[in-house]
């Protein structure tokens, strides 16, 4: 009992991924959910999926479906690691909010200019509007950046050609190149989703803390939540972390050019883009069970202790209007639903938190032709499952309390 209490309060000992298995989620009342997920996977030719469901900070269901790595005969488990794509932005936003609580920055702190955190790039700036960008603009995708022609975070070969680079740009080189281009709109005057903006937030975290982005987030955000098995992704199959799945593109996708420009042809999941270079905009790898633990630590509900203040959590989940992004989350609604998605080649992820205290998380290791819009299809699983269950999730059970 004492050990279980310490795990609940402190999230210590070892990763949940090592102890939570499919055999722990043989719940008769959840069989309809299994049928829904299995049917969805068959319809969309998805190799593997991981589902975690919480009820008021209790992890009541966690299950893997299909294959983690079909070629190696490895089945998906709740603790299998998957690329989380833009779900990473929620983790980055939590890091920024923590730094604000500590007084190390403000959401109104400028990014560039004489008082800006990244003012070492000022000499490359060609548009004075850059000096208007603050941290909140980046969090809300209001920095003035546009991906209308191409997302620079997924366009290494084009960037190399345009700026006469001999190798793919690191974050510093990419920033020097991009701030020399005019902004698409005045910061704060419009919204356009920007991965580059969240790369800048990752660089801000590094500048303020003196640590690498990964080290700061792991030690100051994830580990205090009880999440010990998150990692920044590798780019190739051989770079995967222990317990990490294989990623699968649609069967109709052909090979494409390696982002290094070396003439190699690669699967789009492995080498078409610099996934590691996405940093806080999309590079985290983790399991749905530890992702659930993170969500429980930033949702303001009673149960798992929150790592952020209620004021910060309220700010992150504040609804302003349909055209304004929340902080880290992708969407919030006036009635209190929160949603975060993530998608690129080989990965589709969806988190949805409901006003009744439930949170559903589903991550696939397979792309479909629907691309990022697959999340809209995935929501139907949650909607139908909740309708079938009529709010009744397994009671008296909390997998977070599993002895470790």
Image (spheres, grey):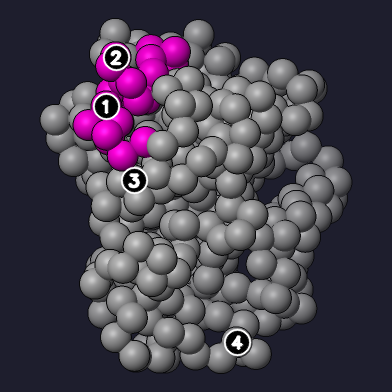
Per the image, is 110 magenta? yes
For the residues labelled 1 and 2, say whether their Cβ atoms are less than 8 Å apart.
yes
Residue 358, label in figure? none
Q: Earlier in the sequence, mark 3 or mark 2?
A: 2
For the residues labelled 3 and 1, say whether their Cβ atoms are less than 8 Å apart.
no
Q: Earlier in the sequence, mark 2 or mark 4?
A: 2
Helix, strand or loop at disc 4?
A: loop
Query: Where does label 3 land, which residue?
Result: 175
Point 81% across, 48% down: residue: 383
Between 23 and 324, which is closer to the camera in this rendering?
324
Label 4: few (<14), some (14–19) or many (≥20) C-alpha neighbours in 10 Å: few
Q: Find the distance from the CA under tag 3 to the CA under tag 1.
A: 12 Å
Q: Find the distance from the CA under tag 1 to the CA under tag 2.
A: 7 Å
Q: Earlier in the sequence, mark 3 or mark 4?
A: 3
Helix, strand or loop at disc 1?
A: helix
Query: Where does label 2 land, which residue?
Result: 115
- Quarter the C terminus occupies: top left
Point 41% across, 66% down: residue: 162
Query: Where does label 1 land, which residue?
Result: 119
Q: In the image, is 101 to the left or to the right of 141?
A: left
**Does residue 64 appear in this view?**
no
Residue 253, label in figure? 4
Q: Find the distance from the CA under tag 3 to the CA under tag 2.
A: 18 Å
Residue 232's place in the image compared with 400, above or below, is below
Q: Earlier in the sequence, mark 1 or mark 4?
A: 1
Q: Main secondary structure of the magenta part?
A: loop
Per the image, is 21 magenta? no
Q: Residue reaching furthest front?
A: 126
Magenta segment: 106-125
């Amino acid at each position: 009992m004492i050990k279980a209490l310490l795990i609940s309060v402190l999230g210590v000992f070892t990763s949940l991924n090592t102890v939570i298995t499919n055999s722990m989620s043989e719940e008769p009342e959840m069989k309809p959910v299994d049928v829904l997920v299995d049917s969805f996977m068959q319809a969309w030719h998805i190799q593997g999926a991981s589902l975690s469901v919480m009820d008021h900070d209790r992890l009541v269901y966690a299950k893997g479906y299909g294959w983690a790595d079909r070629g190696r005969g490895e089945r998906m488990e709740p603790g299998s690691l998957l690329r989380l794509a833009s779900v990473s932005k929620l983790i980055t936003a939590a890091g920024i909010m923590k730094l604000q609580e500590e007084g190390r920055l403000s959401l109104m702190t400028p990014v560039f200019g004489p008082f800006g955190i990244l003012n070492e790039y000022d000499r490359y700036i060609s548009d004075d509007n850059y000096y208007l960008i603050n941290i909140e603009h980046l969090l809300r995708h209001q920095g003035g950046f546009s991906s209308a022609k191409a997302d620079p975070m997924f366009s290494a070969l084009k960037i190399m050609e345009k700026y006469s680079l001999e190798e793919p740009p690191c974050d510093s080189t990419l920033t020097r190149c991009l701030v020399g281009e005019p902004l698409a709109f005045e910061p704060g005057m419009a919204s356009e989703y920007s991965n580059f903006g969240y790369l800048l937030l990752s660089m801000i975290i590094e500048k303020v803390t003196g640590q690498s982005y990964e080290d700061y987030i792991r030690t100051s955000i994830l580990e205090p939540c009880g999440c010990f098995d998150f990692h920044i992704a590798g780019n190739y199959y051989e770079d995967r972390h222990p317990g990490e799945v294989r990623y699968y593109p649609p069967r109709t996708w052909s090979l494409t050019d390696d982002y290094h420009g070396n003439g190699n042809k690669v699967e789009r999941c492995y080498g078409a883009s610099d996934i590691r270079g996405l940093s806080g905009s999309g590079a985290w790898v983790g399991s749905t069970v530890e992702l659930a633990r993170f969500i429980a630590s930033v949702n303001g509900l009673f149960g798992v202790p929150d790592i952020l203040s209620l004021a910060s959590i309220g700010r992150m989940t504040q609804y302003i209007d349909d055209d304004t992004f929340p902080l880290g989350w992708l969407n919030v609604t006036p009635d209190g639903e929160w949603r975060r998605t993530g998608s690129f080649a080989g990965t589709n992820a969806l988190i949805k938190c409901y006003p009744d205290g439930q949170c559903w998380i589903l991550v696939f290791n397979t792309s479909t032709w629907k691309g990022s819009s697959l999340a809209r299809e995935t929501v139907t699983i949650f909607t139908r499952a909740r309708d079938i269950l009529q709010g009744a999730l397994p009671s008296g059970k909390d997998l977070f309390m599993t002895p470790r």
